[in-house]
Amino acid sequence: METIKKHVVIGLSGGVDSSVAAWMLLQQGYQVSGLFMVNWHDTTGLLEGDCPAEHDLLLARLVARKLNIPLYEADFSKEYSERVVDYMFSEYEKGRTPNPDVLCNREIKFDPFIKKALELGADYFATGHYCRKTETTENGTTTHHLLAGSDPGKDQSYFLCQLSQQQLEKVLFPIGHLLKPEVRKIASELGLATAERKDSQGICFVGKVDLPVFLQQKLKSKEGKVIEIAKSFAYPPSHSPVLQPETLSNEDLLHLSKPYQHSEKDGLLTGKHQGAHFLTIGQRKGLNIGGKLEPLFVLETDVVNNLVFVGQGQDHPGLYRSILHILPEEIHHITTQLNPTSGKQYELLVRVRYRQPLQEAMLLFRENGLFIVFKEPQRGITPGQFAAWYDQEELLGSGIIS
């Protein structure tokens, strides 16, 4: 009697990673279907030379034909606009820097995508992310553990830092154990149309964009002052290593975790900008101010007064902070390994952006939220971004930096 194959629906994007992931599922004996998601139609701000969705779809069709699997199409542009793009505009307007790729995974790839896969009769769904998953069972309860990809240069677990146990339950990551060159080699040997395709860049499902032009769809340009802050400016203790953070009170931690707020009198007028909400902490490109000994970097944006504060050099002390704060309602746990009760503390590894090397830090759970105190001050901690914490290679949770 022939065994009925389990059906897997994989997100086939037109990239090399999802193409090889689909092939690997076939090798593992699954019945495989591809699902191409259309999540964005507007090309405003799209940089010349970037591949539009039509090209992605063409490549996905070629791969599906090569692998002899069906390819379905689904338009999630309404959900994407409401859940990801509108949120992105709102955050930039407030002077915060969101991460649309994290939201895209939580709100689109692991929500309407899953529902569509189930409609197609899927037992599982899969993606081409470079990450891995394991399971443990205790007292009849199964816990799904999200692990970093084996390729340290391509690990994409950070982008999945907002997933839940329910979202992880049925997902497969077929290439998480591979290195990128291995994936390219497999695609080349199979003669897949995506073998030499460059990795996608820019905003998830939108592409590589001129961000100010993209944001001007809803946010207006408004000329303002650029104020340069000298390196000799006196910063508070949060810009230096913090000794014995567990002894600090909730009030002290909250005070030290706040980004420093400059004023016009702290520096000198050095240029003009077209809108503080178009810039973000740590940014270098887009200032268009020359004649300095060292490159200028954004230290702070004040959207209320439309001021941008900058400093010379990557070592400017205004770029560094030792403590960040996450509000109680913004803390997300992937597993229940950590006890978030006030007073609990853990020494873990943390990153505040994709591809940032993991940093040693202490997590302090307090009544007014989670405080992350780094062993060494971190460059470019930005409100609105996600901090993700790991126990070695396992991603345990994340939260939005306040």
Image (cartoon, helix red, strand yellow):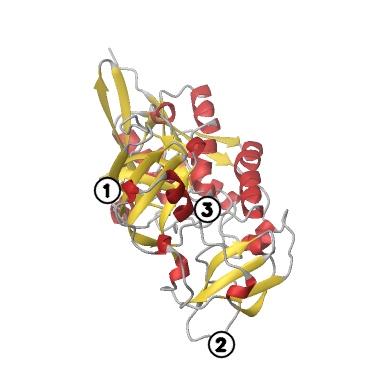
Residue at 70% over, 69% down? 274
Residue 90 screen position, x and y as percent: 65, 48
Using the numbered discs, state the Cα–Cα distance from disc 3 to disc 2 in whole angstroms. 30 Å
Using the numbered discs, state the Cα–Cα distance from disc 1 to disc 2 in whole angstroms. 44 Å
| Precedes in sequence: disc 1 or disc 2 | 1
For mark 2, what is the residue? 291
How many neighbours does mark 2 have within 10 angstroms: few (below 14), some (14-19), or many (20 or more)? few
Where, quadrant-wise, is the N terminus in this rendering? top left
Residue at 38% over, 56% down? 355
Q: Secondary structure at mark 1?
A: loop
Residue at 55% over, 31% down? 112
User: Seen from this angle, which residue lies furthest top?
Assistant: 1
The numbered mark at residue 228 is none
Q: Is residue 38 above or below residue 252?
A: above
- Left or right of 48, for residue 392: left
* In this view, the mark in front (1 or 2): 2
Contact flag, marks 3 and 1 (Cβ < 8 Å):
no
- Closer to the camera in the image, 231 or 135: 231
| Precedes in sequence: disc 3 or disc 2 | 2
* In this view, the mark in front (3 or 2): 3
For mark 3, what is the residue? 383
Residue 95 screen position, x and y as percent: 62, 56
* Dot 1 amino acid type: Ser
How many neighbours does mark 1 have within 10 angstroms: few (below 14), some (14-19), or many (20 or more)? some
Q: Is residue 43 above or below residue 326?
A: below
* Dot 3 amino acid type: Pro
For mark 1, what is the residue? 150
- Left or right of 80, for residue 251: left
Q: Is residue 276 above or below residue 1?
A: below
